[in-house]
Amino acid sequence: MAPLAQSHPDSADRAPRRMPRTVALVGIDGSGKTTQARVVAAELLAAGFPAAYRQNAGGRHWFGRIAHFLGRSDAEDLFGRRGTLLLESLLRWLAIARTLLRRAVNREIAVMDRYAVCQYASLRAHGARPSAERFARLAYRMFPRPDVTFLLSVDPAVAQDRIERRGYDTETMDYLRTAAGAYRALPEYPEFVVIDANDTPEQVTKAILTVLDGSASLRGDWPCNR
């Protein structure tokens, strides 16, 4: 099992006291959010829980592809920094609203790839004014906090290597370090369950499922307790 990050030695104490309805995986680019959200949802489904993978992306990757198609260097070159952050905030808001609506209609456990805190960290990492984050928090305040938020903590050098190996985008080391610091500076940070995401995907999945297993076991929900 991958250990919880040393910066949060008491992360296990923040495990939910029941099987959660909403599980969010957050962290810097290259931390493994998408991979883990997909696998964890599949594992829960295989264990008999009505779980579904849901992505709450802000569209920055697609903005970048559009920018390249139009001969621009990146999304900010096309839309400007403020414009890109505004579009990202809007698209992520719509994605989260859709996820929560599906969860309510389908009565599912939503395993979410990113959530509102990702937008707050993105705003900070991209140097947005404090007023931009205040506006975002006002817009996102209607959404409930997830039952459990896993912060996948990864060395920026490891994250950059993963990004380069996947081959469709890039991130500078300075940005990755700034983004990692942005997550740690969020007021929500003490509530996160911090997972060491430097390990293999299998070890990270096991660490996440161990936390969820413990929460379900308290009510006897996990299939192994039946």
Image: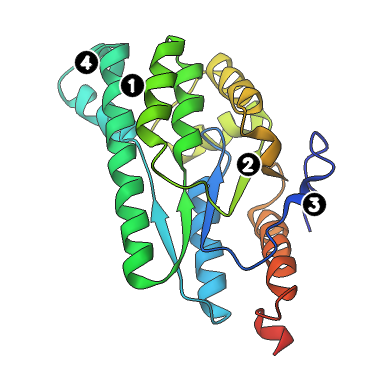
Which residue position is annotated with label 1?
A: 85
Instruction: Give SS at disc 1.
Output: helix
Question: Mark 3 and mark 1: span between their CA atoms?
Answer: 34 Å
Between 174 and 148, the residue placed more toward the observer is 148
Question: Mark 4 and mark 2: span between their CA atoms?
Answer: 31 Å
Tag 2: amino acid: Leu
Question: Mark 3 and mark 2: span between their CA atoms?
Answer: 15 Å
Tag 1: amino acid: Leu
Between 41 and 197, the residue placed more toward the observer is 41
Which residue position is annotated with label 4?
A: 78
Is residue 186 left or right of 72 when viewed as pictured?
Answer: right
The 10 Å Cα crowd at callout 3, few under 14, some 14 to 19, many 20 or more, is: few
User: Mark 4 or mark 3, which is nearer to you?
Assistant: 3
Mark 4 or mark 2: whose residue is earlier in sequence: 4
User: Mark 1 or mark 4, which is nearer to you?
Assistant: 1
Residue occupying image coordinates x 15% and y 21%:
70
* Quarter occupied by the N terminus: bottom right
Work out whether residue 15 can be spotted: yes
On the image, the x and y values in percent for residue 2 come to 77, 53
Q: Quadrant of residue 59?
A: top left
